[in-house]
Every structure is written in C-alpha cells, then in structure tokens.
Image: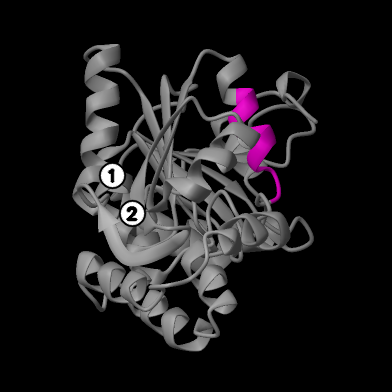
Amino acid sequence: MLIARLIADPANLARAIDSARTELAACGWPVAMAEPIASGSKVIELQLPHGDAAGVREVLGRHCGPCDILVADHEPVIPAVFVSDMDSTMIAAECIDELADFAGLKPQIAAITERAMQGELDFETALRERVALLASLDLSAIDQCLAERIVPMPGARVLVQTLKSLGCRTVLVTGGFHHFADPVAADLGFEHVVANRLGFADGKLTGGLVGPITDSAVKKATLLAEVATLGEGAVSLATGDGANDIPMLEAATYGIAYHAKPKARAAADGWIERGDLTSVLDLLGVRREDWVRD
C-alpha cells in the first residue's frame, strides 16, 4: 500500500483530486480512499493498494500543485532522527553568497553556487573555488553577515523544537561553514553540527579550508551513522534543497525537498513547495496542539 499525504489549495482541491484519481486509475494505481487525516485537518490522505511512489507524486503534483506532499509505503510516524541541510533550507540564505557580498564578489560567487546546487558542478571543486575568492576578507564580516543577513526559514524553529520534544534527535549537516552553522544550530535547537571549517590567520580568511569537506557523501554518511546508533529500523527524516542533498534525501525514511531544485525534488519522497517548514509536521501527522512555538 502507498500512503500519500497532500496539502494544496482548498478552493480547487476536490476537483484536482478527482482529476488525479482518474489518471492514477488509468495508470493502474486506483485510489481506495481520499479524506482528511483528522477532523478539520488541511492534510488529505490518499491510500492506494499499490502503485509507483514516484509516479504517484508526479501525478498528484501536476494536478494539485503547488502543493506539499509526502508519499510512503506505510502510515507516517514521528522520526527518531532528523538530519537537515542549512542554507536555503533552515535559513533563508546561502551563507557564502552573502559573505561574498562583503567582499564585493556576490554575483560571481552566487553564479557558482547556483550551478553547484543544480548539480552542474562538482561540489568540492566549486566550494574551494568560491572560498579562494574570499581570501583576505576580515573575519568581522562573518559576524556582520550573521547579524544582518542570516535569518531562519519560516517554521524552522517550530519544526526542530517540536521534533526534539517528541524524542527525535536533531542534526544540522551543511556544506557551509561552522562559523555560521554553530550559531544557527544553537538558535534553532539542533543537537549536533557537521560542517566545513574556513581557514583564517591574523583575523582574515586565508582562502582555504581546514580538514575534510562536508559533501553529499558525508551528508548521507551522517544520516546513516545516526540511524545505526539508534538501532535497526530507526525512522529518519531529512530535508534539503539542492543536488548536494540528494544522497541524504534518498537514504532517509522520509526525504523531503524544501522549495528545492528540480533534481533534489525528483529524488525525494515528498516536497514542500506551498507552505513553510511546519508543513513537515502536518504531513507527519503531528497534532498542532503538540507543536512547540516561540
């Protein structure tokens, strides 16, 4: 059985679901049930006796989009571990692009970032190229950037704090930098951080990196290590937006792409394209009275 949970525009939702049901049936994937997961809930759950998860997501997304969706082969449950990307997922910025603005290099660096996020460039090569352009930038620019440019995505703190309150371990893993990730994690409530380290000397960036690179393989390995620590069968959740997040999204029980690049969205079990990060809680079936709000 497949369980598809969907949040979409209520004004046209009934008609959109009817159209989707017709196409799904034509594909050999009949919908056995479609109704809210609870009285008054905006989340519609569709149950299909069988079907292809990717195909079901594509059909529902096309008929009901923009929408938030999760498709699983079981009734979704609260995960034991949550591993998330940072830039453009937990925060509304790409840190290296904003930092580059202080060096007068934002257009050049942002163009490289975009190509890397789309999966057009090797991540490590693109990262080292961008960091090299920041050589001699004063470290004070990082503090200024944090204060002026780095803000949480809507719903980020509620998502992290609510999952923690329900016993879920929370991990922030990013191809960005500890200078940014550590304060972001402390603000949002993440318990562990995996990130890259910028080289610096005499109060300025050297243009290099210190230690191993946190890339897509490390993101996936981090998720798998956390699951292994918790024990066989531990349910995991991952969120991300770019190509560098794909292995992690694929490895998670629930990989959810957040306002993501096309390749990341296609690889995920679901996506958020309509709402904010609290939609993840809705799709998991967490009651709103159990949400931890600011």
Classify 108 as above or below 253.
below
- In space, the residues marked 2 and 1 are separated at their CA atoms by 7 Å
Q: Is residue 104 left or right of residue 241?
A: right
Q: Residue placed at 56% from the left, 48% from the top? A: 90
- Say which element carries label 1: helix
Magenta residues (range): 154-162
In the figure, residue 9 lies in which quadrant? bottom right
Residue that numbered label 1 is attached to = 219
Q: What sort of colour scheme is used for the picture?
A: one colour
Q: Amino acid at mark 1?
A: Lys
The answer to whether residue 79 is above or below residue 230 is: below
Q: Please tell me which residue is depicted at 59% across the width and 59% down the height of the picture.
A: 140
Residue 127 magenta-highlighted: no
Identified at 27% across, 49% down, the residue is 214
Can see residue 36?
Answer: no
Q: Say what amino acid the circle numbered 2 marks.
A: Asp
User: SS for tag 2?
Assistant: helix
Q: Are marks 2 and 1 in contact (CB under 8 Å)?
A: yes
Q: Residues within 10 Å of mark 2 (few under 14, many from 20)?
A: many
Instruction: Tell me, yes or no, if residue 142 can be seen here.
Output: yes
- Across and down, in percent, residue 175 comes to 35, 54
Taken as a whole, is the magenta stretch helix, strand or loop? helix
Residue 139 in picture, x, y percent from top left: 52, 59
Q: Quadrant of residue 84?
A: top left
Q: Is residue 1 left or right of residue 43?
A: left
Q: Which residue is mark 2?
A: 245
* Closest to the observer, 286 or 293: 293
Task: Name the front one of labels 2 and 1.
Answer: 1
